[in-house]
Image: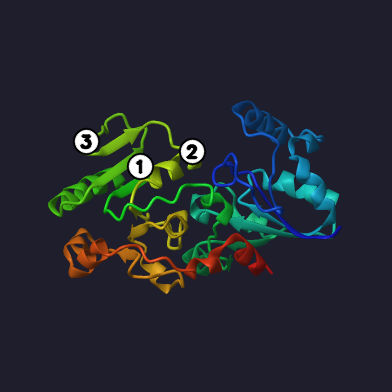
Amino acid sequence: MEVTFCLYTDSFGVFSIPGVNYPDNLFQLYKRNTKISRLLRAIIFKFNFPFYGFLFGKRKNNLAIAKKVILIETNYFDKVYKYIIKKNPSIKLYFYYWNPTVRSKIDFRKVQKYANVYTFDIEDSNKNHIAYNSNFYIPEVYNHYRLIRTHGNKILFIGADKEGRYEKLICLQKRFLSLNLYFVAYLYSLDMNKSSCDNIYIIRKPYSYDDYLKITSNYDIIMEILDNKQSSMTLRVFESHNLHKKLITNNINIKNESIFDKRNIFVYNSIDDFSSKDFAAFISANYVASNKGNYYSYNERIKRFI
């Protein structure tokens, strides 16, 4: 049997939710992702032990019959590359940056010697002359969660503490309170000087993606605060689309995407925008379901690796 392509990832978040039936051509790269297994991989790869094929998952045999392999921001790329080429010398290899290259430990210039490099970020693509392919979502992931429609205005933010987010959340909370809007934030931070206040909860351990989606399902609006290293769509866009939640974001580039609908997505530049008539109209309206997001589904976006 000939396999057109396989997508391998060593990320265990969105790609490893219990009970989800993932696409047949999407596999975990490694067998396990425990602390012990990660340490074992690090030791084996660092000291160049020659026999490491046993680390890879049971679907590694697909490599021998695949025409293309897409790796999502895979650590130890040089070792993984050698293993893949050994299994299938004629395979076409792609490397996809799921995060901005500036935030990645993997130098795209080195990867370009062996693979076709793609990035999800349009500014990253323009700056570094890397091919662009937008972020994507896996429908099977979101079908796994209850679709809760409360027709309310409960706003939720969940994210990591970076680039002044704690202070931004405090300002947002004050503004939303003045508008009689219910806003809750869960901020992952190891800064012991920061503490929970006014529905802004400091958490010391990040939520699993499974837990994140369970929490998000119970709110009406997702809040996104994009940092200045990123310019393209995040998973927040696809979560709002698939869970039928409205989205508040500071990502101005979302307006250039086909998924954008001002009835469902409010783009802000400053905190003053929340006092505008447009925001009032956005808050008062219900979510409007559409099929605009289908273009960004896994099966569609995967075709654009050429």
Q: How many marks?
A: 3
Q: Residue at coordinates 30% horizontally, 46% vertically from top-left?
A: 165
Dots 3, 2 in contact, CB < 8 A = no
Q: Which mark is residue 142?
A: none
Q: Are marks 1 and 3 in contact (CB under 8 Å)?
A: no
Q: Measured along the vertical axis of the image, is residue 249 above or below residue 48?
A: below
Distance of mark 3 from mark 2, alpha carbons?
A: 23 Å
Q: Position of residue 134 (x, y in %)?
A: 53, 64
- Secondary element at image label 2: loop
Q: Could you tell whether 120 is left or right of 37 in the image? A: left
The foreground one among 218 and 173 is 218
| Residue ID for mark 3 | 197
Name the residue at 22% across, 35% down: 197
In which quadrant of the rendered image does the N terminus lie? bottom right
Residue behind mark 1: 161
Which tag is nearer the camera, tag 2 or tag 1?
Answer: 2
Amino acid marked by disc 2: Ser
Residue 64 drawn at (x, y percent) = 84, 52
Element on which disc 3 rests: loop
Q: Amino acid at mark 1?
A: Asp
Mark yes or no: residue 33 visible: yes
Residue that mark 2 sits on:
208
Question: What's the coloring here?
Answer: rainbow
- Compute the Cα span from label 2 to label 1: 16 Å
Name the amino acid, label 3.
Answer: Cys
Q: Earlier in the sequence, mark 3 or mark 2?
A: 3
